Every structure is written in structure tokens, then in C-alpha cells.
Amino acid sequence: MVVLFFTLSKQKLTYSTREFADYLKGTVLSGIDQKKVIPLELGIMKDLVTDNLDSLLKINDELIKNDLEIESFLKNLEKKIYELDPKQELSVNIKGTIVKIEEGISQFSWDESRYPKNQKTIPDILNKINEKFNATFQNLKAKTEEYTNEVKKLQLKKKGESDALSLMKIDYREIVSKSEDKMITTDYLCTILCFVPVSSIDNFLKNYMGYGDGYVLPLSAQRIDLKEDEKMSLFRVVVMKHIKDKFKQNLQSNLRIQSRDYDPEEIKRKPQEEKEIEKLSVSIKEKKITLIRNSTSGYSEVYYGLLHLKFLRLYVESSLKYGTSDYYSCIVFTSQGREQKCVSTMIKTFNDTNDEGWYGTKEELKESEDFYPFILIKLGVPSSI
């Protein structure tokens, strides 16, 4: 679904705003796959204090800039929400009632309690919209950082577990913790853990003592795993400390066997790491729920402000183009991919020149901006309604 905010000069037409919406839906766009046409009453904006033409042009530039910024934020937020929870439904809070986006647009009318117009200027309203947007942006930024930092901590904690499991099916630290009586560490001796493919055990046992220049403790190779892994075995070998690196290099280059130093501190850390991983997992789950809740409520809040911004922008651009309230305004809902057909049909119907090529998109006209015989503002979020 695509949503178009539309304003047209009344010219010689005598319809009421409601009648014009019905005329647009039932006659002009009857052959287009449009879903509905909702009338808008921009005349209610007369309470706003407006200055001269130059100030209107300046504030219109600000409205366009803010419109693009907020839509970009909402697009990114929508993507993040669906990454966190693909089944999440987007909604908008219309004057205290939570409704689906399409229903919210259809029901939209200016919220005087939220954005009072009496004796206010257009910049006053825009500042109020931006205040709520910036507050939501900062809140979600903080919540996202909290969640992301916890995820990074968990990934770092799990890296050791992942590295261990890359060597054999079972975390070798669990095996070593049950065989620490076989680990030898002195001022001159150290234990090397050797990850030997089952198919290479005979070759390993036959050759390992020759890989340390005579400084490998004879017959020190002992298998310490319980054969839980049908493809990989774990041996401990005792060597003199000064040749341990050369021994490991020779194992890798000659037999393609990976090895590691036995580190008693690493083995002791594992139970504590498991507790920390469990604690972080619980924390991440809680922060994710909080982030989803804040993201969806933040989306609703900012989206509501965006609807007012579109309304305000439509009013300003209509005032600049037509100068009075002598125009019709409405919202057109049409199917994705059919909006250009919808716009082209309206151009043909309301063309005030004899040249149909006078109007069109900037791509069609090869100009820097679109040019229509009416005001047209597209609502680009969410990606689907």
C-alpha cells in the first residue's frame, strides 16, 4: 500500500471536500487499484500565525528536511524492529487508542491537545514535533547500545567455547578438568595437549618423541579422552619447556596435528564462564524485550508526529501554491506499484494546460524536481501497510 497526500485548486469545481473525495475515488481513479480516498480539512490550520512569503518558503524547506530525516529514522527503526521480532506488528497511537497503521492514517485528524495551533507559529509546531522525535531517538539509542554491548560481551564469552569446540566435538576443557592429575607442570617441564585424529593415532604414537630434539619425555603420550568423539582423540605429552613451541610446530607441519599448552587457569575459568554466559543470556533476553517495547512505542510516537508533519507540510505548500483555502485536500491509498498510474491519471484529469508533457516526475521531465498541477506528498513509511 502507498499513501499520497494530495491538494488541488478548486478552480470551477463546486464539490464539498467530502464530495470531492468521493468524485476522486469513484470517477477519476475508478480504473486504478486504489483502496480508499480520505478527505482532509486543511482549513483548520488558519489558527496558525503566518508571516510573509519569504518566511513560508524558509519554513517549507525546514519541513521537507525534517520530513526526510524522520522518514529515514522510521525506515531504519522498522528494519531493526523486524530483526528483533519478525512477527511484530507496527501500530500508531491515535489520541490514546492503539490502532494499525492504515487505520491510524484513515482516522487521522489534527491533535489539538498535542500540537495546539492557537496563537502558535509553524516553527512552534515543528519544534514540538522535533522535540518528541529527538527524545525518542536518544532513548532508543541508549537502549540499543545497552542491548548491543551485552550481545558483544556474550559473543566474546562464547568465543572460547566456540574455539574449544572447533578442535573436537566435546569441549576439551571438560576432559582436561577430569584428568588434571595427569597434567605435569614444573620449572622445566610442561604438558602439551594434542588433538589427534583417530585415524592418525598410530602414526602419532610412532613419531611424537622425535619432534622435540630429544627433550620429549619418553612414553609420556597418554590418551585422556573417553572416546566420546569418534573422529578426534586428545593426548597429553610432557616436554621440556624450552622446546614446546618447536614441538608444536613439528606436530603441525609433519602430522597436521593441532596442539595447545595446558593452562590450569583456563580450565578453572570454564565453570565461571558458564555462569557468566547464563547470566548474560538472561540479561540479553530481558533487554531485548525492553528494546522491542521501547522501539514499537517509539515508532508509534514518531509516526504520529510524522502524520502531523505531513499535514503541516501539505498546508504550507498549498498556501504557497494557491494562497487561499480555495482547494481540496485528501489522502489517497493505492497499491504498491500502482502509485505512478494513479498520479498519471490525476495529471491527465487536472491538467490546466494543453500540453500533457508539461507535468510529470523529475525523471520524466529531466528536471531537478517533480512538477504537478497539484500538491503531492508521498508517505514513505512503513515499507508495507
Image (cartoon, helix red, strand yellow):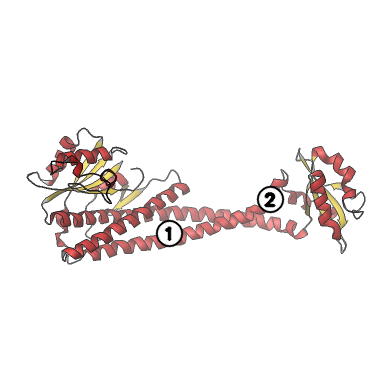
Left or right, 193 with reference to 146? right
Q: Residue furthest front?
A: 366
Name the residue at 15% across, 39% down: 349
Crowd class of label 1 (few under 14; some 14 to 19; many from 20; radius 10 Å): some
The residue type indicated by label 2 comes to Asp
Q: Residue furthest top?
A: 31
The residue type indicated by label 1 comes to Leu
Q: Secondary structure at mark 2?
A: helix
Does residue 106 appear in this view? Answer: no
Does residue 101 appear in this view? Answer: yes
Crowd class of label 2 (few under 14; some 14 to 19; many from 20; radius 10 Å): few
* Nearest to the observer: residue 326 or residue 226: 326
**Residue tagged 1:** 140
Q: Is residue 146 above or below residue 378?
A: below
**Residue tagged 2:** 163
Q: Secondary structure at mark 1?
A: helix
Name the residue at 28% across, 65% down: 127
The label shown at residue 20 is: none
Which of the image's four quarters has the C terminus?
A: top left
Left or right, 142 with reference to 247? left
Q: Which quarter of the figure has residue 119?
A: bottom left
x then y, percent, for residue 177: 77, 53
Name the residue at 34% across, 53% down: 71
x then y, percent, for residue 281: 57, 53
Q: Which quarter of the figure has residue 152?
A: bottom right
Going from N to C along the chain, the mark reached first, 2 or 1, is: 1
Which of the image's four quarters has the N terminus?
A: top left
Q: CA distance from mark 2 to mark 1?
A: 34 Å
x then y, percent, for residue 243: 85, 57
x then y, percent, for residue 175: 77, 49
